[in-house]
Amino acid sequence: QVQLVESGGGLVQAGGSLRLSCAASGSIFRLNVMGWYRQAPGKQRDMVAIITSDGSTNYADSVKGRFTISRDNAKNTVYLQMNSLKPEDTAVYYCNEALFGSWGQGTQVTVSS
């Protein structure tokens, strides 16, 4: 089992930036596929960005060019840099690891217009 702890959410105006962090427990982080997902009220949880063990990335079309996922294997941490935020980015953001399917507790991101 892998424990994940997200941080960095908050309230920001449209056009602003936030950086989310997700710290993972265990020694397998560098081998694991890590991802960020988000869930808005009344909607399903959707993939935002994924990063593989070799650093390959994949993004949802709605965030391409605005969000960047990265990882620091020395710190067992994955990041999501979010720029040019829009009100439609408002959601609870969750960190996920693929090996055991663990989820973090989520962090709220609210973008005001």
Image (spheres, grey):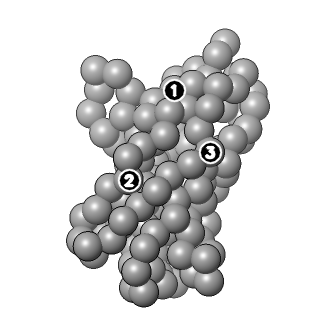
* Residue situated in front as seen by the camera: 55 or 78: 78
Q: Which mark is residue 8?
A: 3
CA gap, disc 3 to disc 1? 14 Å
Residue 74, horizontal then vertical, whole percent: 62, 83
> Is any atom of residue 58 visible in this view?
no
Q: Is residue 6 above or below residue 13?
A: below
Q: Amino acid at mark 1?
A: Thr
CA gap, disc 3 to disc 2? 13 Å
Helix, strand or loop for disc 1: loop
Q: Amino acid at mark 2?
A: Gly
Q: Residue at x 54, y 75 (%)?
A: 76
Quadrant in the rendering for residue 73: bottom right
**Upstream in the sequence, badge 2 or badge 1?**
1
Nearest to the eye among marks 2 and 1: give it. 2
Residue 25, horizontal then vertical, whole percent: 43, 73
Q: Left or right: where does residue 28 sit relative to residue 78?
A: left
Nearest to the eye among marks 3 and 1: give it. 3
* Residue situated in front as seen by the camera: 60 or 113: 113
Q: Residue at x 56, y 48 (%)?
A: 7
Q: Amino acid at mark 3?
A: Gly
Mark 1 lies on residue: 90
* Residue situated in front as seen by the camera: 26 or 88: 26
Q: Is residue 34 above or below residue 109?
A: below
**Upstream in the sequence, badge 3 or badge 1?**
3
Circle 3/circle 2 CB separation < 8 Å: no
Q: Split into 4 quadrants, where in the image is the C terminus?
A: top right
Q: Left or right: where does residue 98 sit relative to residue 17?
A: left
Q: Which mark is residue 104?
A: 2
Q: Is residue 71 above or below residue 87?
A: below
Q: Residue at x 59, y 38 (%)?
A: 9
Helix, strand or loop for disc 3: loop
Q: Is residue 74 above or below residue 92?
A: below
